Image (cartoon, grey):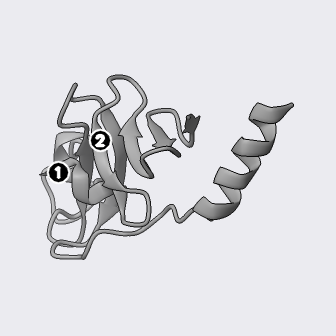
Amino acid sequence: MKRRITENLDVDLDRLEWCCHHCGHSLGSVRENYKKGCLIAQRSPHEIWRPLVDEKHSFSYDPSWTRLVEFYCPGCAVMIEVEMLPPGHPLTHDIELDVDALARRSGEDSKS
């Protein structure tokens, strides 16, 4: 049984795995960070927010201070998540589920 967690992320309660909502590709154990199972791309913020002036202060994020980190499904290449992090920052762990309670609740829902 799968439960939708975000627009692009499901949890498979039978296999206890994160999966892509679109293609079902496994992104690893639900007890771990799903981002570890994603393809990761880092981009300069200047690719998204072009500097408005060619000066020290350009009205765009400084790429030496921050990066766009994009997480993609290895199966279908849909973007699962995007965040801004300082260069070299470890991956954030943004979703932690009470898997046991979710499985119990899903079992109760299927009996109704």
Closer to the camera, 27 or 78?
A: 27
Q: Measuring 75% from the left and 49% from the top, which residue is drawn there? A: 105
Q: Measuring 17% from the left and 41% from the top, which residue is drawn there? A: 47
Callout 2, which amino acid?
Ser
Q: Is residue 38 above or below residue 91?
A: above
Residue 22, can we see it?
Answer: yes
Of marks 1 and 2, the one in the foreground: 2
> Which residue is most to the front?
111
Q: Secondary structure at mark 2?
A: strand
Q: Mark 1 packing: few (<14 Cα in 10 Å), some, or many (20+)?
A: some
Q: Secondary structure at mark 1?
A: strand
Q: Which residue is mark 1?
A: 40
Q: Which residue is mark 2?
A: 26
* Disc assigned to residue 52: none
Q: Measuring 26% from the left and 47% from the top, which residue is drawn there? A: 71
Q: Quadrant of the C terminus?
A: top right
Residue 59, can we see it?
Answer: no
Q: Quadrant of the N terminus?
A: top right
